[in-house]
Image (cartoon, rainbow, N blue to C red):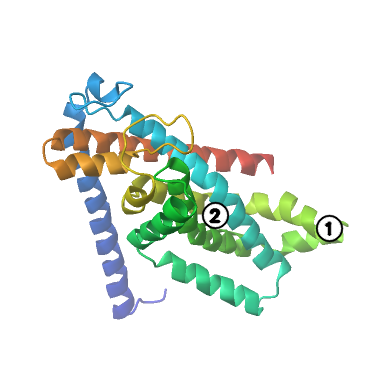
Amino acid sequence: MQTKKPLDIALLVLTWVFAGLTLLALLFIVAHILISGVPHLTASLFERQFTINNQSMFPSIVATFFMVILTLLMAVPLGIFTSIYLIEYMHTGSRLVTIVRSAAEMLAGIPSVVYGLFGLLLFVEFLGFGWSLIAGALTLSIMILPVVIRTTEEALKSVSGGYREGGYALGAGRLRVVFRIVLPSAVPGILAGVILATGRIVGETAALIFTAGTIAQVPSEVTNSVRTLAVHMWLLSNEGHHVNEAYATAVVLLIIVLIINTLSALIARAIIKEA
């Protein structure tokens, strides 16, 4: 039996220590939100219209749902098809691949407030969308695109080359191999990127304040100004008079993220079983 070196033991201990600290931090945050927010969840917070008296979050829940769906519909297909082209159709050392990956890495590091200012100048003012659902979704789609591209690339790379070779040996074309063999195998990794992107959409505030606005209303069209749950929570806590309602909003936000993650995991399992 091989004896572990002192450095290996030290690294193992540090790994367990930091993993435990991370878990404790997560549990503390969740417990604090639940303890502070659950007692203040009242029926008035779920009324259809927002007023000064009820501080309803229902319009923000609907706006968040539409914001997530609209942003993912624009960003996810583009990110996936870009990754497929880079991995399956381009040479590894291609100059275009290097440029796209470098651009994605740089975009991923830009602060969200910069995206907000960009969206304000381009979508709100130059294109004339105003503070609206569509302006916010377009801004967020640019923001999450690097995450979708990079995670999809890694998911495609993780698929064994034997799958591709087997498909080609059976006479299948590249397009059929990619969409019938490679993509289904890469679904868990792709969904992991989509979940990360969804989390950023749901929790984003700075970019949406500049582009989607802060009006608490149920949107009837994409040109309406909206207030997502994260923005709603920030405004309530920032005012200082509705901190309890802000904690209640945080509880609902936490539940929504949990539901999204659970549904994504179920979808991934269903796709893998069918593949």
Q: Amino acid at mark 2?
A: Gly
- Residue 113 sits in quarter: bottom left
**152 left or right of 237 in image:** right
Please say whether residue 97 is visible from this viewpoint.
yes
Furthest residue in direction left, as rendered: 241
Q: Nearer the viewer, residue 264 or 77?
A: 77
Please provide percent x and percent y for residue 207: 36, 53
Q: Amino acid at mark 1?
A: Gly
**SS under mark 1:** loop
Please say whether residue 93 is visible from this viewpoint.
no
Q: Which residue is mark 2?
A: 189
Residue 100: assigned label: none
Please provide percent x and percent y for residue 250: 26, 39
Q: Few, some or many C-alpha atoms within 10 Å of disc 2 (few <14, some 14-19, many ≥20)? A: some
Q: Few, some or many C-alpha atoms within 10 Å of disc 1 (few <14, some 14-19, many ≥20)? A: few
Q: Nearer the viewer, residue 270 or 260?
A: 260
How many circles with numbers are drawn on the protein? Answer: 2
Q: Which residue is mark 1?
A: 173
Q: Is there a contact, CB below 8 Å, between mark 2 and mark 1? A: no
Please provide percent x and percent y for residue 28: 20, 47
